[in-house]
Amino acid sequence: MTSTRPQPEEYCQADRVFYDIAGRHNEDDTSWFTRTAAPAPEGWERREMDVWIVHTPVGHVMPQQGWKIHISGLPDNARRIVDAAWEYCTREGLPFKFLRSVDVLTTHSLKYAPRSSSGKLVTIYPSDEGQLHRALEELGALLDGEAGPYILTDLRWGAGPLHVRYGGFIARWCTDEDGTPVAAIERPDGTLVPDRRRPVFEVPDWVEMPAFLAEQLAAREASGSAADFPYRVERALHFSNGGGVYLAKDAEGRQVVLKEGRPHAGLDGRGRDAVTRLARERRAMEHLAGIPGIPALYEHRVVWEHHFLAVQHLEGDTLQGWLARHYPLTKAGPTDTELTAYARRAQTVADRIEALVAEVHARGMIFGDLHPANILIDDEDRVSLVDFELAVPVEEADRLGLGHPGFAGTGRTGFAIDRHALAALRLWLLFPLTGLNELDPGRGVHQADIAEQRFALPAGSLDAVRRELAPGEQARDRVPPVLREPLSVDLDEARPDWAAVRKSLAEAVLLSATPERTDRLFPGDVRQFLTDGLGLAHGAAGVLWALHTSGAGRFPEHEEWLLKTADRRPPSRPGLYDGAHGVAHVLREFGHLEAAEGLLARSADAVGALRDVSLQRGTAGIGLDLLDAAARTGGDHLRHALALADRTAQAIALGTAPGIAAGPGRGSRAGLLRGWSGPALFFLRLYEDTADTAHLDLAVRALHHDLDLCTTAEDGSLQVDGGFRSLPYLEVGSAGIALVADQVLAHRPDDRLEQALPLLVRAAEPEFTIEPHLFGGRAGLLATLASLRTRTAGAAPGPAVARHLSRLHWHALSYRGHLAFPGEQLRRISMDLATGGPGILLALTAALDGRRDFLPFLAPRTDRHPTGVDHHAP
């Protein structure tokens, strides 16, 4: 199922250690506009909003929605555009905002920046259509000749950088079809509906487009014809800010791949746009024509300013997809024979890739962007290369401007760029954690040791890989000092000092705290910037709860930060893991009952509008928190919880709810936090409280819904069908289903659950995971198996628990000398509950202390533990 997670690239620009927003670390930004720090003119108010500088006339009453003007820009003309917009808007009394600096604009224009905001430099808010028309005419004359990327959500005015879109001026919220809180605009009847920002111009159905804009739209639509584009697009293969990649058929019915390049968009590290790179790709493919494994170039075509290459469609899957299907360490119980066979096959594949790259080199070219997503492999293990936008003559191969983490060799030039990537690929095929090299450039040497040992390769087999991946001085110098200190604990030894490990892990979390910031207390996943930085999954509440539950202690100064921030800026969402109820649960557990009650009261309207039933952000999670509030404080909380139970029961009866199943072939989000197992847990707790077997009936039925969304994997395990892959994890995956099914079976036999449970457990046993964390990685599998082992008195899952513990060092990093772990996509360290050190600390609590309450409400009513036991005392 398609993920809603934002691309990490824009959150990697400000800090090399943690994900952060581009607006942070201002001291490193020397490209501010002159107007950025200027005081507001007389009669105006100035404020900063993240990376935006906002100016509004004193006393101005902003319309809630309407036609807004966006001005796009480029790094080399942005200063002129900001100056012109400032002068015009302050003279005409138009509220406006602009980006802080050239560097921020560049970040928003990068290849993998969000397409909906790409190129937006200035936003202007006219009060009516007359003001809108006048501003477009007059600004259009002032900015005539200035270039900027086309803003995909908008309609362009003329041929310049001005664009218009109907949307919200004031922040208001509603929920979309999946139940996700989104920006809203208001229909004439007062109903709030999503303010859609898809990368296509669209007008709400009740809004009449002004005639002067309708003329622009008609002119745009008349600018192209079917003859200009003789292709029928079947589906999109990939999108970036620079354009799409599409599977299509030409006029003769031949299947082709279309690569699109948008002018002035999708910048690389040297400021080159997608059209420039597409032209380079065209030249490279022409030069490499005729090499087996290099797709043929059919034509280059320009359609309404966008450039397209039509390229031969080659059969096969990406090397990423091939590894996901065949890698034996992601399967339960691989035999030595299977490991040996795979290692031999991986070597053959690597040899074929190397031979193909040698053909490229023989023509005086480098490929430049060699990584698993740019390699196709067919059913006979024949390989091909795709995506030649970085392929250049060897004499031009110095700083290419783009590169894939883990495969781009820092400081290398010429053929050495590809040699480094080939060595990384050889290692990746055996041990696919090369992405960690961005945080620890010397990691490849240690990973080669693991690969030789695990696949029983002769000692020294990977020495050439070790030599090539050994970091040079430039790569080592790029590592921030806080990541270079020797780690104070050794996870790699036969019997680690687990008390020291847990203490070090907690210490790293505490050392990362930034109480001086108002947007977040602990660094975590990029989602914390979309969910207030307060909640259980990615915010301060979850970190403090994890530290307390795992025995690391209470930290009053950080609790005070949470109290003050939640009061000043309460969560915009009501959910348990992404909003107010999660924060309230933690505050209630810490004894801050009045503050917790206040959050529940302020989120009540949002709860009423929810259609999501999940544990993470819907009625199941909120219902569980209300049961807890009722037990601790009384009031109307039980009544509200039962009302949510009725709504959740209706969804279970229908067998459908927003955001769980995407449809045949598109996967699902089944599992504990996003699927039906969360509602099952809610009804299981209601049964334990009331002994009403109707609640148990609903729990069983909900679990059956999640089982309906599972598939049998090659190793016989039962995993959630995620579309292009199967998922064994806790948030989405079979581990979460197993946890709840195990507890339900303690109360009632059910043939389907009895048969499924061992297969769900088997899915949690494989020793390799790409990521280490609780929600979608090793820690969640470890905690799940440990919880099941506790119930079964040390039966089957025991060896798998020990194996997961012994493999934690595969991802371990040093942060200021203490133990830390990378978050999602391994690009930066995370210190949140869902994706970072606190979640791993909770998994260790489950594995080493036999506790099942490693997440709120997971422990049965008969299995409650006092929190806050100090495991770190001497």
Image (cartoon, helix red, strand yellow):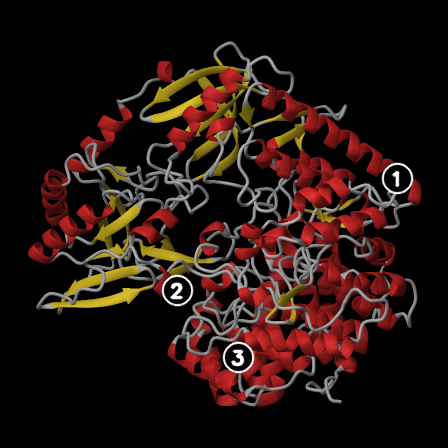
Q: Quadrant of the N terminus?
A: top right
Q: Nearer the viewer, residue 764 or 412?
A: 412
List the residue tagged with mark 3: 584
Please tell me which of labels 3 and 2 falls first in the chain.
2
Give neighbour class at mark 1: few <14, some 14-19, many 20+ (Cα, 10 Å). some
The answer to whether residue 41 shows anywhere in this view is yes
Q: Nearer the viewer, mark 3 or mark 1?
A: 1
Q: Secondary structure at mark 1?
A: helix
The residues bearing labels 1 and 2 have C-alpha atoms spaced at a distance of 49 Å
Amino acid marked by disc 3: Ala
Q: Which residue is mark 2?
A: 25
What's the distance in space between the residues labelled 3 and 2, CA to CA? Answer: 31 Å
The numbered dot on residue 413 is none
The residue lying furthest to the top in this view is 252
Q: Amino acid at mark 2?
A: His
- In this view, the residue in front, 868 or 402, is 402
At 91% across and 70% down in the image, what residue appears?
794
In the picture of the structure, the residue carrying the numbered disc 1 is 340
Tell me the distance, in whole angstroms, between the alpha carbons under discs 3 and 1: 52 Å
Q: Residues within 10 Å of mark 3 (few under 14, many from 20)?
A: many
Q: Amino acid at mark 1?
A: Thr
**Residue 709 placement (x, y as % from top left):** 70, 48
Q: Is residue 150 shown above or below 616?
A: above
Earlier-in-chain disc, 1 versus 2? 2
Snapshot quadrant of residue 456: top right
